[in-house]
Structure formats: C-alpha cells, structure tokens
Image (cartoon, rainbow, N blue to C red):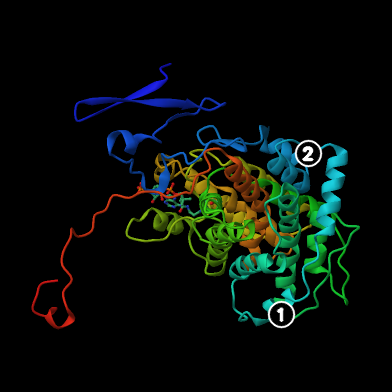
Amino acid sequence: MTDTAKLILDGTTYELPIIVGTEGEKGIDISKLRQQTGHIALDPGFANTGSCRSAITFMDGEKGILRYRGIPIDQLAERSSFREVAYLLINGVLPTQKELNRFSVFLNDQSLVHEDMQFFFQNFPRASHPMGILSSMVTALKSFYPYLEDLEEETNITVTRLISKIRTLAAMSYKISRGHKVIYPRPDLTYCENFLNMMFDSPVKPYEIDRDVVQALSIFLILHADHEQNCSTAAVRVVGSGRVNLYAAISAGVAALWGPLHGGANQAVIEMLNDIVKNNISLKRIVERAKDKTDPFRLMGFGHRVYKTYDPRARIMKKMCDIILEKLNIDDPLLDVAKELEGIALEDEYFIDHNLYPNVDFYSGIVLRAIGIPTNMFTVMFAIGRLPGWIAQWKESIDSPDGKLNRPRQIYIGPTEKPYIPVDQRETVSR
Ligand code: ACO
C-alpha cells in the first residue's frame, strides 16, 4: 500500500502522508495542507475528519464493533462493573484487585458534596431541566474545589471527585425536585447501589437494593461509557484544548449531550413511544412521517453517524429490556410498541437504503423506566455513564504532543468589503 496520497492543485503535485491506525483505519494527514497549498479542507459535520489519534475506543460502524481499550463491549457488559470500566478507560488497563479496591475507596471518600451546594438546587425554577442543572452544578464544583490541577495527583483527585460527585449531584437534584429529604451516600454500598439508594431511599420507605436492578444500571452505564469522537466528547476536547479546568470542559460535554440528536434521544424515544400508545397512533403512520422530507419528524432512537448496521449497544440493551422486565415482573406496553416499530422500520425500503438501525437510545429508556428513573432524568443517566469517557478523552488530548488549541477554519461566504454607512443615510443608500 502506498504511504502518501497525491493532490494535484494548479498543476503542482503535493504528497500527503497516509496514516494507518492499529485496526487498519486509513487517513490522509492534511495538517500541513494550508501551509503548503493555501487551501483548507471543508467538511461540514466532520463526517470525514479525524480530529485526533486516540487509543481509547475503537468502533467499526460497518461491522457493528465497539471496544474500550481493545476489550469488546459485550464482554465488558457481561463481566465487568462500571467502576472497573471507568478505571480501564481513564488508565488504559484493567485494574488489579488492589487497584480496584483503592479506586473504590477514593470514590467513596469523594462522594459527599459541599452542603452549600444544596442551596443552588433550591433556587432553580421548578420546571428546570435536570441537564441544565447538572451542567451548572458541574461548573460550580470548580468554585467549591478550586485546587490546582497542575500536579498529577491533583488531577487524579479531580477525576475521582467528578465521577463520585456527579452521582450524588444527580440524586440530590431528583430528591430536591420532589421536595424530599436528600439521602447521603453510604460507605458500605458500591457505586451503582449508592446511586439507587440516594435516588429511592426514604425515611418512610427504606429502599431495598435489588441485585438485578443494580446489574441493569451497571450495564446501562458501561454501554454509555465512551464512544470515541461523538458530539459531546468532541465538545469536551475542544473546550479542554483552551486549557480550561476539567470541570468546565465536562460541563460543556453535559450541555452538548442534552440535544435530542445526541444524548437527549433517550428521553425523546420514550416521549415518542408514549405518544404512540396514548393516542393509539398507527406505527405505519409514524414510519411514513419519518420518511417524509417535508416533516421535521425523525424516528427517534434510529440512525447513527458511524453505525451503518445494528448498534452493538442497542443489541445488548434490547436483551436487557427483556431480562429486567421479566425479573421485575413488569409488563411495559412501550416495549411491545418499540419491538413492533423496529420490525416495521427494518423492513422498510427507506430505512434499508439509508442504513438506519436502532441505536443505543431506542431501548435504553425502557430499561431506565423499569428501574424507576423518571423520564426527564434519562439524559442525566447518560451523562453519568459517559463521564469516564469524557475524562479519558480530555486526559489524552491534554497529554498528547499534538494537543493544540482546537480552532477550525471556514470558507467565508459573506459580503466582500463595503463601507460603513452612517445611520441617517441608510434609507437612501442600498444596504
Ligand atoms: N429517521 C428518519 N430519517 C433519518 C433518521 C431517522 N431517525 N436518521 C437519519 N435519517 C435520514 C436523513 O433524513 C437523511 O436522509 P436523506 O439523505 O435522504 O436526506 C439520512 O438519513 C442521513 O441523515 P443525517 O442526518 O445526514 O445523518 P447523520 O449522520 O448526520 O445523523 C443522527 C445521525 C443525528 C443520529 C440521525 O440518524 C438522527 O437524527 N437520529 C434520530 C435521533 C437519535 O436517535 N439520536 C441518537 C443518536 S445515538 C447517540 O447520540 C447516543
């Protein structure tokens, strides 16, 4: 295979290096393109642009492969815990038992949040979306923990603090939104157990921790833990490239995740399925609307920028829906509708031609509903899961020798130079 690509511009031939990744992915290095040719590359939506070299997550959208640090997602979902996956993503290797125990102790040590943070929650308007609150609270953490992040040890504390406290903040916001007493983290509980207990324990109705629910939550978080250069991760890397503190970079990730085309899709899917059930809407009609180019409606939970086949996470999530609903003895009509809708879409020519398959969000909401998470907190759950990935990607970008300030270029298509017109002449002179 050739190791350079040739670009001919105005009769001059330029040689551009070919970069090959460990899984055989090929790219053309255009980092000197403008310097050498005076031209830039234009790629709206970045579908053809690699923004970095990364050793964290590999995905093959054609084959439906997803691996964290080389380990297939199905093996991690089946055998690992969210804590362990967080360690793996951030440190690059699976922890030894001793390292895992140490990490758990650190997470436990960091799980409380400053008592004054409760006052912030109380002053958000009642109807605030939890993602807006979470993004603000993550930024606010910097004011409560304003330590330097120059030393590796300090960075490690900040990392553990974020992973631990995001869970406490999410549960606190839920309790406060319901006007209920905040439940504190407990040292005897694991990461997922603690979250569920902080969400659902109450002085009048103690929460009984169910192993199956803990397992379902752990798998949900593992499946969301990283997904290479997606919208929110790219936001974390771009914002982080300005050498902002980690809290602010993560807050940018939370904000990016909120959108319905990205993490907000899990909430949008449940709203869509609910609407179908409540208003008895024909599934054929839904699919027709999704295909209609004059209608902005899209089939939520379908399609993906990279996967052009079944999202491997959706496959695991679908299986989990069946398992958890059966174990908890729940009959959720939304699951039947989702399966039927999937069947119709997968046989439809438009969906086949466009390579549109269910993504992770199509079934995840049904699992979250089953374990008692309110719909408006679904995207918060995604954020808790994605946090280790954001941190790993931020760390990699900061430590990378190519770690420059991210600053794309543009092709300007506005007016060419024209003079300033004083206000009293604007009626008469053409603007
Ligand atoms: N329903 C109907 N048509 C769709 C859908 C959908 N869900 N998704 C894509 N298409 C169509 C588009 O209309 C377009 O058709 P055209 O080429 O005939 O004009 C074509 O497929 C390509 O769509 P794009 O928006 O250009 O593809 P892109 O890669 O930018 O979009 C995205 C990916 C945003 C995920 C899209 O599939 C979508 O909007 N899906 C619904 C929202 C969703 O589920 N988001 C969660 C994604 S997973 C995640 O972020 C965790």
Instruction: Measure the alpha-carbon separation of dots 2 and 1.
Output: 40 Å
- Which residue in the structure is indicated by mark 1? 119
- Name the residue at the left extreme: 428
Label 2 or label 1, whichever lies nearer to me, is 1
Q: Position of residue 252 (x, y in %)?
A: 55, 59
> What kind of element bears circle 1?
helix
* Residue drawn at the location 59% of the way across and 61% of the way down: 248
| Side of 242 where 380 appears, left or right | right
- Which residue in the structure is indicated by mark 2? 79
Above or below, 143 against 252 in this view is below
* Residue drawn at the location 74% of the way across and 50% of the way down: 156
Residue 42 figure quarter? top left
Residue 238 appears in the rendering: yes
The amino acid type, in three-letter code, at marker 1 is: Phe
| Side of 49 where 367 appears, left or right | right
The quarter of the image holding the C terminus is bottom left
